[in-house]
Amino acid sequence: MTVSTATPINTSQIRPEIQGLQQDLVQWRRGIHQRPEMGFKEELTSDFIIRKLQQWGIPHQTPIAHTGVAAIIEGGKPGKVLGIRADIDALPIHEENDVPYRSQHDGIMHACGHDGHTTIALGTAYYLWQHREEIAGTVKIIFQPAEEGPGGAKPMIEEGVLKNPDVDAMIGLHLWNNLPLGTIGVKDGPLMAAVEFFECQIQGKGGHGAMPHQTTDAILVSAQVVNALQTIVARNVDPNNSAVVTVGELQGGSAKNIIADSAYLSGTVRYFNKDLENDIGQRVEDIIAGVCQSHGASYDLNYWRMYPAVINDARVAGLVRSVAHSVVETPAGVVPECETMGGEDMSFFLEQVPGCYFFLGAANSELGLNYPHHHPRFDFDERALSMGVEMFVRCVEQMETLQI
């Protein structure tokens, strides 16, 4: 598969030197795509990043949080320190794309664009290093493991990735197949939701399917729990706030004529408003406890928080938005309503320093490159790679105008 020219895209705002990197970007991305690795096991990917940084002579720190890498590019003029973050891990998905660069690791796939994020960050590092004397301030490019889980941002922060030099602001991007190539999603405030999970084992009393009066039907109890959990968003959350409670798994029973003595369910909770951080989890347990008590069943609940919400700083988002308008040119190309209930551990960085995470449109429906993220046929239009480098470079060039 070659780089597509089927859908017209205005590349006039991508400087010739970055356009000249496009074939290298494609080659790097496809090499990474062929060797996907799970969280904290990204040895091949990390080694590739390090080899490139060494080849170019870029100072870097490693290992950070097992397989993390941070490249440091000091500009020729004084200024702020900008962090750029890219995630490097893949997903436990067997790829179904019939392309020469398909995954060579069975059951593992870059199905969310992290291979592209890594490539864009590498291209940005290369360009900035070649032009470091023109840069005001310092750029720290953070290659982060384990975004898909269990989370690499927090351990990188704990190991000091935002220190020495201290990062003043952060930016990052996500290639986004919910937006077409040539568009960029930027917004102030909440962009991606907080992520919480729960698992619950419900214990009843089994028996004969013809004699329910002798039993406590764990499946019946579970069904009522599933229904009752939906009242949390419907009746306990302010309608002006967005939230989701989803039960994604329900297991129980062993035969048609046996009433199950136990059942298992699991699910996820998503929301933007930090004020809901404790409320929804408490309501989940209250409802499970109440339904179980009313039926004489018992339960064992495991509830945990994974990532907080991604909250963009208005000042940094303003900088990114200004850059986006200059790159895509037309106002319609910058999409302000782009929030999603998906989660991201970029949120931990944005809790520490002001920053902006934004979406870079990468879908091309004419070429079938519009499968959703985490799908076994996910892929994207690789022309987004040079656009991503241009976005990052322009943000660096305008960093000195940022009032933080």
Image: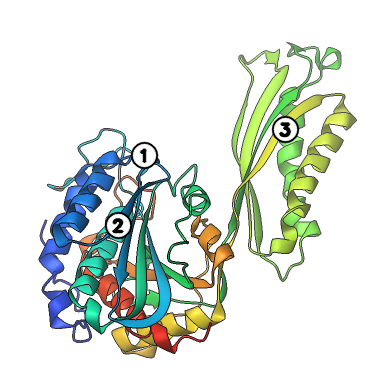
* Above or below, 73 relative to 30: below
Q: Which residue is mark 1?
A: 38
The disc, 2 or 1, on the residue closer to the chain's N-terminal end is 1
**Residue 363 falls in which quadrant of the image?**
bottom left
* Above or below, 237 relative to 151: below
Amino acid type for the residue under numbered disc 2:
His
Q: Could you tell me if residue 341 is visible in this image? A: no
Viewer-nearest of discs 2 and 1: 2
Residue placed at 79% from the left, 37% from the top?
A: 288
Q: Is residue 131 left or right of residue 260?
A: left
Amino acid type for the residue under numbered disc 1:
Met
Q: Which residue is mark 2?
A: 60
Badge 1 density bin: few <14, some 14–19, many ≥20, Cα 10 Å: many
**Residue 173 falls in which quadrant of the image?**
bottom left
**Residue 124 falls in which quadrant of the image?**
bottom left
22, 203: nearer the viewer: 22
Total label count?
3
Do tag 3 and tag 2 residues touch (Cβ < 8 Å)? no
Mark sitting on residue 301: 3
- Determine the secondary structure under disc 1: loop
The disc, 1 or 3, on the residue closer to the chain's N-terminal end is 1
Viewer-nearest of discs 3 and 2: 2
CA gap, disc 3 and disc 2? 44 Å
121, 9: nearer the viewer: 121
Amino acid type for the residue under numbered disc 3:
Leu
CA gap, disc 1 and disc 3? 28 Å
Residue 262 on image: x %, y %: 70, 20
Badge 2 density bin: few <14, some 14–19, many ≥20, Cα 10 Å: some
Do tag 1 and tag 3 residues touch (Cβ < 8 Å)? no
346, 113: nearer the viewer: 346
Viewer-nearest of discs 1 and 3: 1
Residue placed at 81% from the left, 25% from the top?
A: 298
